[in-house]
Amino acid sequence: MVKTRISALIILIVAVALGYFVYSTEQITTQTTSTGTSTPPLVTTSESSFKFKLGLDLKGGTELIYKADLSNLVSQSPEESMTALRGVIENRVNALGVSEPIVQTETSLSGDHRLVIDLPGVTDIKEAVASIGQTPVLEFKTERPAGAEKDAILAAYKKAQEEATQGKPITMSPLLSQDPNYVNTALTGQYLKNATLDFGSQTSISPAVAIEFNSDGAKLFAKMTAENVGKTIAIYLDGQPISTPVVREAITDGRAQISGNFTIKDAQTLVGRLNSGALPVPIELVSTQTVGASLGADVLNKNVTAGIIGFIVIAIFLILWYRLPGVFAVVALAIYVVLMLTLFKLVGVVMSAAGIAGFILSMGMAIDANILIFERTKEELKMGKSIETAVREGFARAWNSIRDSNVSSMITAVILFWLGTSLVKGFALTFGIGVLASMFTAITVTRIFLMTLNFKDSKFSRFLVSNGFHIS
Amino acid sequence: MYIVTYRKFFLGLSALLVIISLAAIFRFGLKLGIDFTGGSVLQVTYEEGRPDFETVKKAVEALRFDSTTVQPAGDNDIIVRTTTLSETEKDLLLGALSSKGTVQMTQKKFDSIGPTIGRELRTKSFWAILLVILLIVLYITFAFRKVSFPVSSWKYGLAAVIALLHDVIVPTGFYVVYNHYVGGEIDVLFVTAILTIVGFSVHDTIVVFDRIRENLRTGSSKTDFKDTVGISLNQTFGRSINTSLSVILVLLVLLFAGGESTKNFSLLLTVGIFLGTYSSIFLASPLLILLKELQDKKLAHAKK
């Protein structure tokens, strides 16, 4: 008895401490530092790093999904390219000045590689899309050796041309996406160190763009030029050949020049784009989701209110129907809520509208274990057992049902998590954690509290632990 | 117990509900949202009151985007659905909605989903639902492996799955009719709700079956299987009602007080949770008796 009372006390203290943690980490602390008499005091505000992470659908913002085209990879693995791509995109997104942007890579079921970009607070996406999407893809290609492959591509081109002139639909072939004259190499814009505007060219009146590779790029470029002396190499920008210089000698210092028919303005833009980071692979925007901040805030407020009302409704129901054990179940439910909120903060669960709905739903389900136990206790009481035995038996016998039924809920949560758009993941995570946490609070916590009481078998105490319309 | 006595009536009622729902699904069709088909949805709000709707609608339709629908929403909003739009096309649309920037308006929500993503989500959802059902049957068969008398354990799984299909089909039928007459569409949240209903339905059925299992173990072997089921139903009745009552209470709060984006979700769940409870009492258990009777008939036939 003393032991259980101490346990109960510890649980209560921990719960209150967790509650304080949840509350305090939501507050914005304002610090006023006085720097002297003549200057106004410095006011700094700081937010806890444990503040709830809100999804874009609640705080407003944009999620962009890009598909990366990895079909022309030569030497790199898809994972390497995606990491390189993410690095470049992160730079660009950070340059936008958005607070807490998230850039993630993702592989779809069908094997597509994607980039998911979250931009909180951004609803006018024009600027973001422009600076993320319109980055140049710079590629260096070498001459395609004559042979069966070249003939096949040329034949495909010829066929397509004939079909076009005859007004027939063109037979699509993967060969058509290839250049008959040049093949891809490992050298791309990702090896670029910097680009500068170059007017010093003697061969051309129009400005050129001088580029310098990093050490890896320089090695690749040296190898490529050494192997192709006397031949042409092609420099492609965004899939279009812009220059096909003839290699006179191997270039080992990692410097090259792109000369096309640039106007000064074109050349300047190109330099700017190249310097801000060329993309290792082409990307395509496949999905955009934008939620205005006011809409998000409205949903957040309403769902939080619904959660509070939901809690009160359940509490009233539990106490009216289940009497004394009901009161303990409400305490257990409150501990459940505090525990869940703490877990959300510690794990860093991103709260979405669906996630909050899942949490509210899990409150309703959390008390299922309690209801099973209390109904069972009532049956044991009816059979004439003493209160203490009835309570013990109620817990022991309800356990099988609680375990088996919760396994099925966990299966659902895991599969939902796998289904995984960000919206659904939030729901699955809150729901899944909820099932586990509720088993702990509804069973362990309620039992410890009930066991702290010293039941004397009187009509009144039997009334207290019974429920529903059952009086004696 | 009256449920056992009138089990044929309840089985018939459930069958009727399923048939009506299937008919509704075939009649109205599943209205897939852009999550699954790809496309764009733009919602704008006019702070100073919505301009003449017909004028705006004509301006939008003049852009001739594929499969365009223009709808008023709330007091001051307009929602436009189209095929997947590019940035330039979206600008044209915003221009049409604001009469080239002369009308004050803010963009509340813009979703644009490419067809590949939509297709992928459709496949994924389909597999998710199938996988959940399969895993749950396996789990029930496993959990009930020790009670193969008088009804083999896989039959508990079968009865639970039939109840589960009932709990998926009927809310879907309801939602399709709701989509047709009120609004909303089949989106990712619909799938989420359906999977949650599946979880709950089975959860509820297991509690009842668990009690049958316990009573079979402790009860006298002379008691008829039918009566054991009846007793078990009696014992779990209060719990079933109270659990779903508490879940439905919070869902109703969420439905009426919660945010717009989870309204249809809560509605669907309310219907589903109600049916999940109903089916575990009025469908799964009578089914179990039916399966037992079929088994007995077969045995009797074999003995002859």
Image (spheres, rainbow, N blue to C red):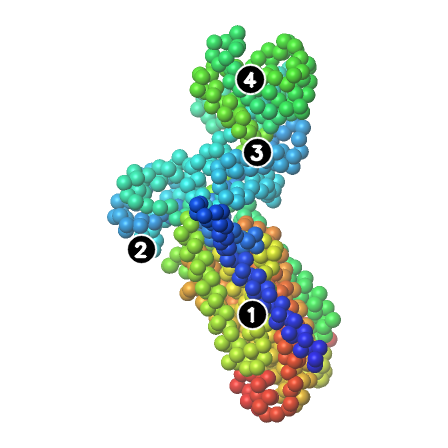
Q: Residue furthest top?
A: A202
Q: Residue A235: where, in percent of width, then height?
A: 56, 19
Chain of the residue that carries numbered disc 1 in the rendered image: A
Q: Residue B72: where, in percent of width, then height?
A: 32, 51
Q: Calculate the distance from the C-alpha at mark 2 to the C-alpha at mark 4.
A: 58 Å
Q: Calculate the distance from the C-alpha at mark 3 to the C-alpha at mark 1.
A: 46 Å
Which disc number belongs to residue A334?
1
Tag 1 or tag 3, which sits nearer the N-term?
3
Q: Secondary structure at mark 2?
A: loop
Q: Residues within 10 Å of mark 1 (few under 14, many from 20)?
A: some
Tag 3: residue type?
A: Val
For discs 3 and 2, the disc positioned in front in the rendered view: 3
Residue at screen point 57% across, 88% down: A463
| Quarter of the rendering occupied by the N terminus of chain A | bottom right
Tag 2: residue type?
A: Asp
Chain of the residue that carries numbered disc 3 in the rendered image: A
Identify the residue position indicated by label 3 in the image.
Answer: A88
Q: Calculate the distance from the C-alpha at mark 1 to the C-alpha at mark 4.
A: 66 Å
Which disc number belongs to residue B75?
2
Res A365 → quadrant: bottom right
Q: Calculate the distance from the C-alpha at mark 4 to the C-alpha at mark 3.
A: 21 Å
Tell me, yes or no, whether the two marked residues, 1 and 2, touch with CB atoms within 8 Å: no
Identify the residue position indicated by label 4 in the image.
Answer: A210
Q: Residues within 10 Å of mark 3 (few under 14, many from 20)?
A: some
Position of residue B232 in the picture relative to residue A170 (left or right): right
Tag 3 or tag 4, which sits nearer the N-term?
3
Q: Residue A32: where, in percent of width, then height?
A: 48, 52
